[in-house]
Image (cartoon, grey):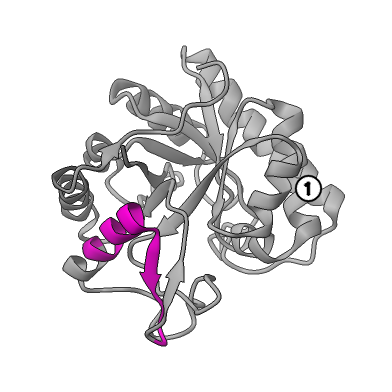
Amino acid sequence: MVSVDLNCDMGESFGPWRMGDDAAVLPHVTSANIACGFHAGDPTTMAHTIRAAMRNRVAIGAHPGFADLVGFGRRNMDVSHDEVYDMVLYQVAAIGGVARAHGGRLAHVKPHGALYNMAARGADLADAIARAVHDYDAGLVLFGLAGSELLRAAEARSLATASEVFADRGYMPDGSLVPRSRPDALVTDEAQAIARAVRMAREGRVTAVDGTDVAVRADTICIHGDGPHAVPFARELRAALEREGVTVRAPRPEGA
């Protein structure tokens, strides 16, 4: 039986500024990665998003990033191993604490933006993230780019992992994501993005920008919830997966 998780970055509004329609996307996904206040989000948004995820029986995840509200956490930062450990531990503990206060449970962690991409390539940074997650709760699932240093670091610390793929992002021949600075970074044709996602889930392969096939492990598929067509895309992607016999469900943390 083939199964896959559908995850979405959420809780990225801040004060009166709003990003995405989380309430409308939640019924169609199985995991919510909730901003922790560094790159986006605030305490009230965190609590609101956690409660909404619980109502929809969606797994609650922490989405830690760099302290970069202006750059939305997408700018690389020169940080030490210890600084990364501290900032990830702080953010994961924040989401975990709010979830527990509302009767929920943290299930996973997925780094955001530049932190995610830097950890995909950098072993030291990846280990700092994995160590912070392990030290907070060794039963959590760590999400990372398929084939990345982050997943290797998590496995070295005996953490459960979920290999992540992206329906609407271009892939390089080495399995990395096309940089957002390039015009081919995003797959804008929704039908094509859905077909790519289904193929990754069923066959474990994706076509790179040079036309070659790349092997990927698809435990979880990312849906970007901030796009104008996020809700119909999430709904149609889930329907397409289920038509193809793919079970859509969240990874289970240890002890769940």
Left or right of 123 on screen, residue 203: left
88 vs 185, nearest the viewer: 185
Look at 55% across and 60% down and name the residue there: 113
Does residue 215 lie above or below 103 as drawn?
A: below
Instruction: Tell me the magenta residue range.
Output: 194-210
Q: Quadrant of the N terminus?
A: top left
Identify the residue under disc 1: 128
Q: Pinpoint residue 203: horizontal percent, then vertical percent.
A: 34, 58
User: Is residue 224 at all visible to an observer of this figure?
Assistant: no
User: Within the image, what quadrant is residue 183 found in?
Assistant: bottom left
Look at 47% across and 52% down and name the residue there: 164
Look at 33% across and 66% down and name the residue there: 168
150 vs 112, nearest the viewer: 150
Q: Secondary structure at mark 1?
A: helix
Q: Pinpoint residue 141: horizontal percent, then vertical percent.
A: 57, 35
Does residue 133 lie above or below 239 as drawn?
A: above
Look at 38% across and 83% down and name the residue there: 184
Does residue 200 lie above or below 128 as drawn?
A: below
222 vs 151, nearest the viewer: 151
Q: Pinpoint residue 4: horizontal percent, then vertical percent.
A: 36, 42
Does residue 155 lie above or below 187 as drawn?
A: above
